[in-house]
Image (cartoon, coloured by chain):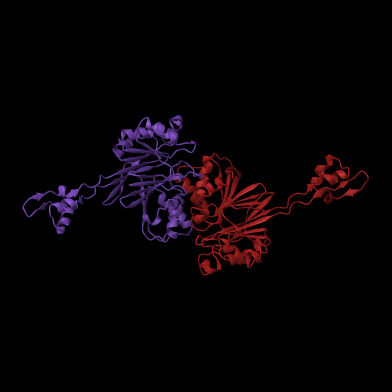
Chain colours: A purple, B red
């Protein structure tokens, strides 16, 4: 699982910082999460192949999470895209993108499938045999969802060395992969468990931005491996946080602690701060495993 | 008159090139012309004060000329703007910006005044005592206008040295500035012309992008000082130009020649070309005074 931060600063794009967007590589998927203005340039800068992206998840319809989407949709067309593109986001996202395409008389030549979200509860929005994606209802100035990405338990894989040590012929290998036990010529039964490796432990990633402090999400993100939680402010600005429906680093850490997550990644810093280090210092007082997102940073889990 | 090119490449923003946007400083105005994605970052990069911009002219509603506008409108709000903002562009621009603001529940706290354009003829869209702005109907895949910016003839200014040489008292200076002749004590009449300097010759700038070759515009832009004309293609790609409703460098030069302009600036290059120099070479065969736009370039006239 690899997370590439394309942008993680609040409010407005600037010369050196970008609004929210990130790419999650998980089980051969490239999921794009949020799409602030400039995301397509960030994708190019980080050499992420546009054609690998088939699913875009938009948390909410504020510009710094969304205004890069119309341009990206248009660029896909210019690049000759033919594959379907799935876009998950709040109701209204379809109307806005379609209006912009209509005004430019530049409809896509690929199928644009919108999955509009309206539920206030956590709902499953995507699932295949390898991963699932659920919403995490957040508390912001407009309807907002985070997203919980979960790998599914994979198959057990053949331990060739052990199989060979019992003299098992290759023609039985597929049976072993399918979960069968093997009866040897001498009548002994070798359990499948002994002949296979455990599948890798499935990983999970929760993206929570933008949101005020909202402990209701704890049961949804309980024990997640990686939690990205917005920390727009430091405790010094604690008075502004609830008014603007944002969180402080301390609040993000409190959520991480309550949810018993593996690692907390902070982001969505207000551009008022000259350094982001104090976010880590503040959060670390509450929760031990804190990482700082920054534009261009890659996290491999 | 100063022109700053924020972006002058076609189609899609890339790591090193930006879609169309430029700032024209003319008679204390800062006119923003087109607003492709990333324009607000380009404004910051070139240290153009956001508060100085009160008028935005949008040629057409293709993303590479327009998708930076929603973000810019939002950023003005975040910066605490109070002054009215006037936006001139094709019908539909108001609906789209208003929809995006509504979806984000983030209305502006300043007055956003839309001047929607529908005419197929050249019309006056802005005028004060120093400048006028008229549309230049272009030929593109959607309804598109260029814009003709013209300085007005300024006032004659007092030639203090000459006035003093006649012993004219200061209390008459305002009369001279107002265009009056002066009768000296000895009865001689001194003509106003002798007591004042000619006003500077008014300058004019025509922005023409995007458009197929369209000689109809020649009478509108006749004798303009500076013509920015799109040259998406070189003659080699002449077959694609009319299909996509774009021009070649040669066609841009032909328009410049027919209109007897002072200088031609080429831009809106297709990103297929590795170098823009051939655009100048090609245009120079037809018209002598050719300049190449490039992102970040400033032209002072």
Residue farthest to the right, as pictured? B186
- Judge whether B265 appears above or below A126 on screen: below
Query: Residue visible at 56% across and 65% down?
Result: B248
Query: Residue visible at 54% across and 43% down?
Result: B76
Most foreground residue, A107 or B272: B272
Tell me the quarter of the picture where residue A239 sits: top left
**Residue B289 in sight here:** yes
Report how many numbered discs are placed on residues in the image. 0
Horizontal side of A290 relative to A99 (left or right) equals left
Horizontal side of B76 relative to A115 (left or right) equals right
Q: Position of residue B104 (x, y in %)?
A: 45, 44
**Residue A113 in sight here:** no
- Judge whether A42 appears above or below B273 on screen: above
Q: Position of residue A221 (x, y in %)?
A: 31, 39
Horizontal side of B163 relative to B88 (left or right) equals right
Q: Position of residue A240 (x, y in %)?
A: 46, 32
Horizontal side of B167 relative to A31 (left or right) equals right
Residue farthest to the front, as pictured? A165
Q: Position of residue A295 (x, y in %)?
A: 44, 44
Most foreground residue, A223 or A196: A196
In the picture, which quadrant includes the C terminus of chain A? top left
């Amino acid at each position: 699982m690899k997370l590439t931060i394309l942008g993680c600063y609040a409010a407005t794009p600037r010369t050196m910082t970008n609004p929210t967007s990130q790419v999650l590589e998980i089980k051969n998927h490239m999921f794009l999460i949020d799409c602030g203005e400039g995301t397509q340039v960030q994708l190019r800068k980080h050499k992420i192949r546009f054609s690998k992206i088939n699913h875009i998840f938009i948390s909410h319809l504020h510009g710094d999470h969304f205004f890069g989407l119309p341009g990206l949709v248009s660029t896909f067309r210019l690049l000759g895209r033919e594959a379907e593109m799935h876009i998950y986001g709040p109701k209204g996202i379809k109307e806005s993108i379609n209006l912009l395409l209509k005004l430019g008389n530049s409809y896509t030549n690929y199928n644009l499938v919108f999955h509009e979200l309206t539920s206030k509860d956590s709902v499953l929005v995507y699932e295949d045999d390898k991963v699932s994606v659920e919403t995490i209802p957040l508390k912001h100035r407009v309807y907002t969802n985070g997203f919980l990405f979960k790998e599914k338990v994979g198959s057990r894989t053949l331990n060739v060395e052990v199989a060979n040590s019992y003299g098992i012929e290759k023609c039985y290998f597929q049976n072993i992969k399918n979960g069968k036990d093997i009866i040897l010529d001498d009548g002994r039964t070798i359990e499948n468990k002994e002949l296979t490796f455990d599948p890798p432990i499935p990983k999970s990633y929760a993206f929570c931005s933008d949101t005020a402090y909202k402990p209701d999400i704890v049961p949804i993100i309980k024990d997640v491996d990686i939690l990205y939680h917005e920390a727009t402010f430091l405790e010094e600005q604690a008075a502004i946080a609830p008014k603007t429906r944002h969180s402080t680093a301390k609040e993000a850490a409190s959520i991480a602690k309550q949810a018993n997550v593996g690692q907390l990644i902070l982001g969505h810093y207000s551009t008022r701060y000259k350094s982001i280090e104090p976010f880590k210092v503040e959060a670390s007082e509450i929760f031990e495993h804190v990482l700082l997102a920054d534009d261009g940073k890659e996290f491999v889990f």
